[in-house]
Amino acid sequence: MSVNIYDVANQLESAVRNSDEYAQIKALHDAVNTNPESKKIFEDFRQIQLSLQEKQLSGQEITEEDINKAQSTAELIEKDENISKLMQAEQRMSVIIQDINRIVMKPLEELYGMNEAQGE
């Protein structure tokens, strides 16, 4: 039986989009974006994250100022109920995505695991 992997991937994408977890993230994301204060803090946080990642990838030093800026923004996020709920929901979705990835990769892990065991 031949399976079109892309069709299955599109079905999975649809399942994610129609899941309760995604609906919760979307509602919480909307709540952040409709609150000007939450939106500003969230955008600042994302920008700081991107900036730190770019510095790491390019081998630039992360300064004390960068760290302090990230910490102060993290404190604001913890105090903002809209953002903290969104980040908790994102974390739950991340666990689901990791589980899905583990399931999808299982055939290759078994294949290479068995080959390694046979080679010993």
Image (spheres, grey):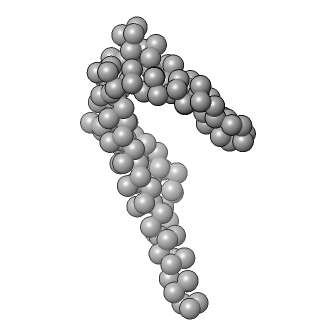
The answer to whether residue 96 is above or below residue 32 is: below
Q: Nearer the viewer, residue 22 or 49?
A: 49
Residue visible at 50% across and 78% down in the picture: 113
Residue drawn 51% across the image and 57% down it: 4
Q: Residue at x 60, y 33 (%)?
A: 52
Q: Dividing the image into 4 quarters, which one contains the C terminus?
A: bottom right
For residue 22, side relative to residue 42 (left or right): left
- Figure check: 112 above or below 75: below
Residue at the (49%, 24%) spot, across then down: 45
Percent x, y of residue 75: 39, 24
Please identify the quarter of the rendering in which residue 57 is found: top right
Q: Position of residue 49 (x, y in %)?
A: 55, 31
Task: Tell me if residue 22 comes above or below residue 73 in the rendering.
Answer: below
Q: Position of residue 40 (x, y in %)?
A: 46, 13
Residue 29 visible in rendering: no
Residue extending farthest to the front is 64
Residue 107 x, y percent position in the rendering: 47, 70
Relative to residue 69, is residue 18 drawn left or right?
left
On screen, residue 5 above or below 89: below
In this orientation, does residue 20 appear? Answer: yes
Q: Residue furthest top?
A: 36
* Residue closer to the observer: 48 or 15: 48
Count of numbered badges drawn on the protein: 0
